[in-house]
Structures are given as C-alpha cells and as structure tokens.
Amino acid sequence: MAKQNWKPGNMLYPVPAVMVSCARQGEKPNIITVAWAGTICSDPAMVSVSIRPERYSYNIIEETKEFVINLVTEELAFATDFCGVREGILTNSRN
C-alpha cells in the first residue's frame, strides 16, 4: 500500500453540531452553532469547543468564562443552521 498524504482536518465524521449559548450580565443572550465540539475527559467531565476569535460569542465567553452547550435534535436542525449564519446579528445590541 502506498503512503497517503491527508490535508489537516477532522477525520472523525460526522462531527456533532451543537448550539453554544452565552451572555453578558444585563444583555440579551447569544447563541452560536459550533461544529467543533467534543469530549476531553469523563472524570472529571470536560468538553471542548472551538470558536474563532472573530465570532461575536468569543469575546463574551472570554469575559464571562461561562457558556452552555446545547445538544441538537432533528427538530432543531433549521434553528441550528440559522444560528450558524446569523450569530450575533440579532442580539448584538446592548440593553
């Protein structure tokens, strides 16, 4: 068998999409669709999410150090897709 060269990427498909919610105190909550999420350890329970610094949610999570990972069902497929392209636009204003 000949050697194969693979481009960098996630080889563990399908990657589960999750919706990550976050908020600053006194502001509307925000939600972002994240495709890069996974289990790091089971004892203690730890998970990882990868969010680009350019995303609106990134700064919120950096400041608050808090977020919620929401698992997605088939019924939430449309909402998951919508939040993946509209994150931060509807909830970007301060109250």
Image (cartoon, helix red, strand yellow):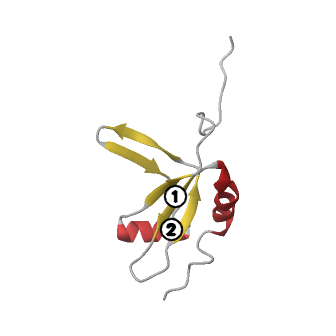
Looking at the image, which residue is at 60% across and 41% down?
A: 15
Q: Quadrant of the N terminus?
A: top right
Asked if marks 1 and 2 touch (Cβ < 8 Å), the reply is yes
Residue 81, given in percent of the width and then of the height, sits at 68, 58
Q: Residue furthest bottom?
A: 95
Looking at the image, which residue is at 62% across and 36% down?
A: 13
The amino acid pointed to by label 2 is Ser
Looking at the image, which residue is at 62% across and 78% down?
A: 90
Left or right position of 83 against 40? right
Residue 75 is labelled as: none
| Separation (CA) of disc 1 from disc 2 | 8 Å
Looking at the image, which residue is at 56% across and 63% down?
A: 32
Element type at marker 2? helix
Judge the density around disc 2: few (<14), some (14-19), many (≥20) Cα neighbours within 10 Å.
many
Left or right position of 84 against 94? right
The amino acid pointed to by label 1 is Ile
Element type at marker 1? loop
Q: Which residue, given by chain and number where applicable, does mark 2 sit on?
A: 57
Q: Residue furthest top?
A: 1
Q: Which residue, given by chain and number where applicable, does mark 1 sit on?
A: 51
Residue 79, given in percent of the width and then of the height, sits at 66, 61
Quadrant of residue 67 in the image? bottom left
Q: Is residue 88 above or below residue 70?
A: below
Q: Is residue 49 above or below residue 44?
A: below
Residue 89, given in percent of the width and then of the height, sits at 63, 76
Judge the density around disc 1: few (<14), some (14-19), many (≥20) Cα neighbours within 10 Å.
some
